[in-house]
Every structure is written in structure tokens, then in C-alpha cells.
Amino acid sequence: MNQENGNLDYDFSRLAADYRRDAIHVRQFALHTPLIRLPWLSTLTRKVWAKLECNQLTNSFKIRGAFNAMRKLSPGQAIYTASAGNHGLAIAYVARALGRVCVIYVPVNASELKLRRLIQGGASVETAGRDLHEATLIAKGRAASTGSAFISPYAHEDVIRGQGSLAVEILEDMTEPIDTVIAPLGGGGLIAGLAPVFKAQRASTRLIGVHPGIFQRNLSGRHGNGLSKVVPPTLADGLAVQHEEADAELASRVLASLDEIRMASEREIEQAVVALLHNESVLAEGAGAISLVPLLHDLDAAQFRGNTVVIISGGNIAGATVMKCFTARSDNARVATMLGHQSARLASEVVKKDNVQVPVRPAALLERRPPVTSMWSRLLVCLRQQFIALQRDLHLHVEYVSHQGLDRNANVTQLVVDSVDRTLEQLCDLAQQPHSEAELRAHYRLLIQQYAFLRNSLAWCSASTDQSRIVMFFDSQENSSSTVNYDRYGSMLLRRKEILLLQSLGFDPERNDLLLVSSGQAAFSVIESFLMGEALCPNTKAVTAPYIYFEALEQLQRLPHVDIVRAKAWDIDTVIELVERERARVVFIDPLANLGTMNVVDLRVLAERLAGKDWSDKWLVIDGTMVSGGLDVFSIFDQPGHPNVLYYESGSKYLQLGLDLQMAGVIVCRKSVADRLAVARRNTGAVMYQSAVCRFPDYNRGIYLERMALLTRNAEILLRHLERDERLHERIEAAYPRRWRDLGWAHGGGVVAIHLCEDGLNNYACLDALIERLMERCRAEHVAMTKGVSFGFATTRVSAAAAMADNMPPFLRFSVGEESETEMNQLGRIVAQTLDEFLVTRQSLLA
């Protein structure tokens, strides 16, 4: 391996001296774990020892590197990291012991056991990314933006030095020279820490790395960094590490240090777990026991002789996984005996299939990408990335299915592959030609629905987690879960979208969580179900502002055991006095009412007025639909005594950028209650299902605010035209949150409501006649506008809207679109002139 990798020249003696100095500090914190003999793997020509790091603090060697890195940081510096489990457990443990603040990002496919232990240990845990690679990128970015320290699980030099203390301990305990060391190979941090110490002590010591064969990586060192390939699920989940581009030097260093790399199948890893438990009563996780696999294949010591040390790196394994390992069988009678079987049993023959060839051409496609300027161009680039990811996932699916020896309908899979390839070509061709924003938007709306169809064509609403022959899953990550995975329980795809949306709406992902549901009303239903168990008990009272959305009010009014009290006025002091007089447990207030008057509530003033009061047992429910992504209510109500906050939106139009592809809703809450809200979502069936998730566009905070700023500008242009005419100004009342900047909102939204001052005009017949005249004027002047309810679309639309509660009269509502400034001025002129002419005509008829 050294020769194949260019025999890179590392000064092992110098590195070993550095590692020994750090080991002096590490031993003051970490345990000195046992080094035991394994007579059942020893022969006349071989003695085998096992270093039991599964007995270490937090049950893995990771505590060594975590402590060594953390002890060198500046006092008070916060720590960010990403981990599939063991590194996170170690960081959390050390941070707690040293009184430091740490945030741990875990991928959505993290081990349930390790994730549960992280949370139980009091760690601040963020779920982000479909795998450790994505979680790492997110954690790095967050650390950089906050000036905090990022401690990599494997690529941090002080972490590597800390792992070197493991080799120092082994050499202290061994009285005989070591011929071979066998260790797990994941990200390479352990190997990089072991190699200098062992090689400096005895250059002839062989270092063997054992890697999961299911990864199907080329680790010869001749084809770039093979450790950067995406990983499917494995029993050795602690080794499921994907390198970044910046890790190329570490990969070279690791591969140059290894004398050989052995691949272990999933069945062989299971056998190693059982063999260690059966013969030594030592329970190790797959990533720890994997080091035994080469020796189980060399029971006669034909390949490994002399003094051999195996590193049992960790012991965090779930009970369900242990039970799965007990099913491991071997067709080798001697291995079967080590597993505790009375006789060897032949494994079923695996019929291997030819791979479906999935051409992956993302690099070539990206080379054709032109400079990006417009918002819809950027969204098409995001969509192209989604298709490239789908192309990759198809490749991994076929590779995984073939490796597992499963049957598949290759022709059907190939049809999906071909469709994805053609769509990618179409996206690239689209990017080469000039198109208007309207054309790009139309293409995007069609193509994202095509993506949704293709992404779900091979998926299952209840994917299998294990199988023989047949395939009932698409994403191989689904195969690593032993929990119920009905579509209404959510999915990794859903979780990824929730994380993106939480950040895009401007909420703090470290303190808050977001649940994506099927509609805005579904969001309210989930909140109602949650509050039924928390606050809306029999004989309790709930206070609402003078108006909340009519369907939400209907839901509350149907609860016979809850008394709903509505405030008579919008001012904050009136609401506070009513809540305290009625001793209400739940309060419903929206920052911007969905009314023709568009009443505004300054939530900052409410928070200030609550100073010195104890509302900590109350719940404040906020519908932020009208100011979507415009304010972070959780940063407003963050003082002792403030109420608990639940925030929700109807995301059907704004959050879908006006594409109106399906209904949508979001709930945002503190992390402390997210689990209970998720249960309510699951049990009410309100989740956004995977087919709809795929139609939801990918974007970031910048793109979303850019669009909302455009809608705000156009709404204010329309307002200026309405207020410019003094005669018209006397005949109408135009409503819009003009003070949105003073209120601290990020935008003012795109809705302008108009009430006609003359009695008797605010009815559907009159408003429809006015709208018809307006549409005729727009058609005559070739100006785009549509008639219809709702808001947030790309083209301005008008409707005779109604609050639909308390028999409130309808009003004229404009939802402005994405028109250019020139187009919006033209439309504003037409609206003002048409209103003026209509009202003048009405007055003359009455005269």
C-alpha cells in the first residue's frame, strides 16, 4: 500500500514524539482500557490481543481525541461538530465535564441508540443532512459564521493526536514486539493517530485497515480520494464517513500508513460481533468488531502471524441490531463454532445480477452552466442539483441492490434513469438560451413536478427495512431503520426539506424546529391536538384577538369544554387585561390580520408589556401567514416569564414561490416540544407526504427574501398610485402594513386590501362588476392580471375577498406579483383610473 500510494514520506518519529506528549494529558481524563488475550483466535504461530475501547468513557475511543482537541481551545469558545454518534457522545461528555458549550449536528440516518444517548446526556443536538457528509458541511458553516470552533470527527489534527494515545497505551501494556495491528477504517482519524506511534516504535509492524465492503470504494490510492464516495447504510455505521475535497491530504496520509486494506461484508461484521460476545462476553458495535474479520478468515494463521493486536473501537450498539447479528451464519464449520452454533449451516446461494449501467455525468453538465442572474435562473440551478442528486441516488440504488443480490426490474429502473438523463439535458439546454422570467418560471413549474414524479416512481410509502430477493425501497438509507416507516411518519426527504425551510424562514435552527404539514389548516389542527393535552383542559379559557382565521376559530368553537373569549379591541393592553382577567391558558394573536382592514399587532410591544408578569404557563399561538418569514417571534418572546410560543403558516403560495403545486403548511416551535408536536402530526395524518415534498422548491433565505422584497416593492407602488389621486383617496380606504420597517419585519408582504367608503358598495355584485371592468381595461392595454382568490402568485391577481366570519362584508384584495417596476407602474395606473371611473360613474347614476 505504501508503494501504490507513492510511499509518502511522513516523519513518524517526530509525529510519535508529539503524540506521546499529548497522551500525557489524555490519560488524565480518558480511561486506560484493558488489553486482553483472545486465545480462540490465537495459534501456535500467532498470539492475538484485543484493545477494548468499547469499555472506554462513552463506550468508544472517540473520547481521547475529543478531550485533546477541546483542552487546547480558548476559554469560553463554543464548539460545533458533526457526528454519526460516537464522536458526538464524546464531545458532549467532555464539554459537560469542562463546562463548555457544544452543538452537535447529526444526520437524519444516525443510530437511534446514539441519538437517544446524546439527547439524554443533555447535548444540544441539531438534525441536519441526509448523512454525515452533509451534516458536517452544515456544522462547519455554522461554526464559521459564529466564530466558534469546529471539531471534526476525523480530520482535526488534535483529534488525531488524541487517538494516538491509544497506541501509546498498547505499547505500555505489551512486553513483546507487535507484528500486526488491525484497526477499523472510517474517516481515517484513528489510523492516522495509530500509525506514527507503532511505526516509530517498530518500522516492520504491519498496520491493517478494515473497511465495510458494502461501500464499494476503490482505496488503491490511484483514483483520487476513494474515501469521498457516498456511503450506503451499514452495520458498521460508525465507519460511514464521506470525505470532503479538503480531506485529500488526510486520505493520502492514511492510505500511505496502511500496509493493507481488507473489506468486510455485512454478514462478516455480524459474525464478528457475535463471535466476540460468545467467546469473551464483550459487546462491540459493528464498527468496533470489524477488526476481527480478517482473523476469522485466517484461523490457521496463514496470513497473520506473530503478535497481533485488534482495536475494538466502540460498543454503542442497539439491542435490535444485536438480535439481527445473532442470525448470522457461516458455511465454515470452525467459524460457526466460534459463533456458538453446534454445526455449520450453508448460507443461501446468492445469484448475482449484471449491474444496470447508470451514467453519471454531473461534471460535464455543470461545465455547460452559464452565468446566473435572475431568481428563477438560480432556482433552476437548484433544481438541476436536485436532478443530479437523484441521478446519484439511482446509481447508489442499483449498486446497493446488486451488491445485496436482490432481484429487480432492471428495465423499469433504466426507464427512470433515462428520463432523469433527458431532463438534465433539457435543463442544460434551457440554461444556454435567453428566456424571460415568465418562461423560466413556467419551465420550472413543469420540471419540478417531473422531478417529483421521477423521485417517487421507485419509492414506497412504507419501505421495507430488510428483504430477500424482492426490492421494496428506493433510498438505501431506509434499509438501516428498524422503526415503522409509514409515509405519515415522515421521511429523510421530508426532514431535509424541513431543515432548509427553517433556515429560509429566518428561525434559529439551534433553538427551534419546523414541521412540514399538508396545509395551513392541518398545521392548526396539529397545534390544537397538541394543546388538548397541554393546556386546553376542561373548563379552561382561551383568548383570541378580535379576528383570527375563520377556520381556526371554527375549530376552537367546536370544543365544548373550552370557553373562547374574543377581545373587542386590537390594542395590546386590552388583550393583556382580558387574558389575565379570564385566566386564559392559551392566546391566539396574529401580527397581521387577514382582513380588509389588515390590522397590525406589534408583538414586540406585547413582549415589553409582559415584563414583570409570569405568563410561563400560557401558550401564545401565532399565525404568521401574512408576514411569512418576516419576523422571528421566538427571539421576541425569549425572556423569563414569557409565554410558550407556537408559530404556524399556511405555506401554499408564499412558501412555494407562487407555484401553487400543492397545499402546504408549517409549524415552528422550540425544540423542547418538537417531539410531542411530531406525535400529534403523525397521529392526525397531517404530515406532508413524500410525493408533495418533492414538488416543494429548494431555496435559501436569500432567495426567499429577494422574492418577498419584490412583492413588497410592487405592493407599495400600487399604494402610491391609489393615494396619488386625492379624489380617489377620499372614496377608498387602502390597507397595507405601511409601518413594516418600524415593526422590525423583513418585508411587508404582497397584499393590498381596498374598502369602498360609500355604503352599499362592498358587496359581491358590486365588487365583481368593478373587477370585470378592471379586467377589460387590462386586456385592452395588454397588461397581465388574473382574477382569483389567495395570494403570493407571480402575476398580480384580484378578488372580492371575504373574512368569512361574523358576516363581515367582502373587500377588494390585490395580491401583487413579480412584475417589473415599469409593469407595476402601468398596472397601478390602470387600477387607480378604473376605480376612479367606476366610482364617478356610480355617483353620476345616483345623481
Image: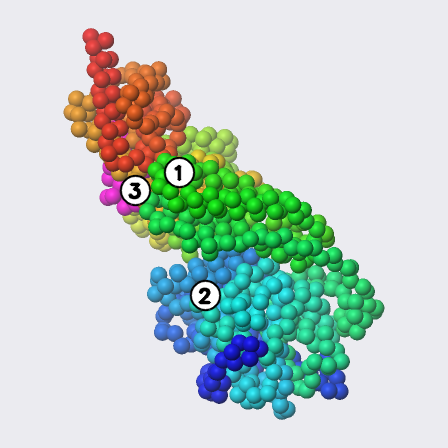
The residue where tag 1 is placed is: 441
Direction from residue 523 to residue 754 in the image, left or right: left
- Nearer to me, 748 or 584: 748
What label sits on residue 245 in the rendered view?
2
Q: Residue furthest right?
A: 343
Q: Position of residue 76 (x, y in %)?
A: 36, 70
Q: Position of residue 457 (x, y in %)?
A: 59, 42
The magenta segment is: 734-751
The residue where tag 3 is placed is: 709
Identity, as a three-letter code, of the amino acid under mark 1: Arg
Which type of secondary structure does the marked residue at label 3 adopt? helix
Crowding at dot 3, Cα within 10 Å, few <14 / some 14-19 / many 20+, comes out as: some
Residue plotted at (60% across, 85% down): 205
N-terminal label among 3 and 2: 2
Q: Is residue 222 visible?
A: yes
Q: Position of residue 373 (x, y in %)?
A: 32, 47
Crowding at dot 2, Cα within 10 Å, few <14 / some 14-19 / many 20+, comes out as: few
Q: Residue furthest left?
A: 726
Image quadrant in which you'd find residue 3: bottom right
Residue plotted at (23% across, 9% down): 845
Q: Is residue 116 magenta?
A: no
Q: Is residue 738 magenta?
A: yes
N-terminal label among 3 and 1: 1
Q: How is the image coloured?
A: rainbow
